Amino acid sequence: MEETPTCFDRFVRDFTRLVDDFSGDEDEILRQGRELLADLVGRDDWLADRYAQPHPQYYQQYLLHADPADRFSVVSFVWGPGQRTPIHNHTVWALIGILRGGERAESFEVVSPGLPMRSLGDEGLGPGTVESISPRTGDIHRVSNLYEDRISISIHVYGGNIGRISRHVFEPETSMPKTFISGYSNESENSA
C-alpha cells in the first residue's frame, strides 16, 4: 500500500516541479512559490517537534529539505523570546512564511563603506504571512522574534543550500561586511 504524502512532502514535490519548470525565472519562482509556501504555513500540524526546539541563547536554523542539486533548501527558524539575527544578506532569493508567533523584519542598505547602514524600515509579520527577498531588490536585513515572551517559528525557502552559501553579516556603524557560512542547527543529523 502506498503511503499518503504529508503536506510537507507535497510542498517539496510541488516546489521541485516549480524549480524544474522555471529554473531561470526568479520572478515566477517567487510568485508561485509564495502561493505554495502560504498553503504550507496556513496549517500548523505538520512540523516535527525536533525541528521546533528553541535554544535559550541562539535562534535555531533546522534544515528540513535540501534539493539534491542545491537549487533550493527549506529551513525552519525557531526564535526564542527576544532573539534576533545580525544584519545579514543571502546572495540568493528567499521566501519567508510565518508558521507560529511573529517576526520583525528590518531592511537595510549600504550607503558607502565606512558609513552607517541606512534603515529602509521594518515590518511585523504574523502567522500565515509570506514575504520574499532577492539580491535584485535588496536582501540585507535583520530578523527578530516579534515577541519577548514566547517562541516564534518561520519556514524559509532559499534559492540554494543556504547553510553552505558564503554570505555576509554587516557592522551597522560602518557597513563593513564579514563573510560567514551559517550551517544548520541539526548539522549532525544531516551528516550521519
Image (cartoon, rainbow, N blue to C red):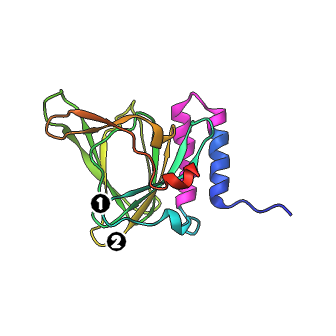
Residue at the right extreme, as displayed: 1
Task: Give above or below for 19 relative to 144.
Answer: above
**Marker count (numbered):** 2
Q: Percent position (x, y) of residue 135?
A: 39, 32
Q: Amino acid at mark 1?
A: Gln
> In the shown orientation, is residue 191 left or right of residue 134?
right
Q: Main secondary structure of the magenta part?
A: helix
* Number of residues whose C-alpha sits closer than 10 Å to that of mark 1, classed few (under 14), some (14–19) or many (20 or more): many
Task: Give above or below for 14 relative to 189.
Answer: above
> In the shown orientation, is residue 105 left or right of residue 157?
left
Mark 1, residue position: 83
Q: Amino acid at mark 2?
A: Arg
Look at the numbered disc 2 and give the secondary structure of its residue. loop
Task: Give above or below for 45 relative to 5.
Answer: below
Q: Quadrant of the N terminus?
A: bottom right
Camera-side residue of 65 and 144? 65
Q: Quadrant of residue 56?
A: bottom left
Name the residue: 51% across, 37% down. 160
Name the residue: 19% across, 34% down. 175
Of labels 1 and 2, earlier in sequence is 1
Camera-side residue of 1 and 45? 1
Mark 2, residue position: 150
Q: Percent position (x, y) of residue 79?
A: 37, 62
The question of residue 30 being in magenta is answered with yes
> In the shown orientation, is residue 106 left or right of residue 21?
left
Calculate the distance from the C-alpha at mark 1 to the C-alpha at mark 2: 10 Å
Please report the bounds of the magenta region as a residue range: 19-41
> In the shown orientation, is residue 42 left or right of residue 137?
right
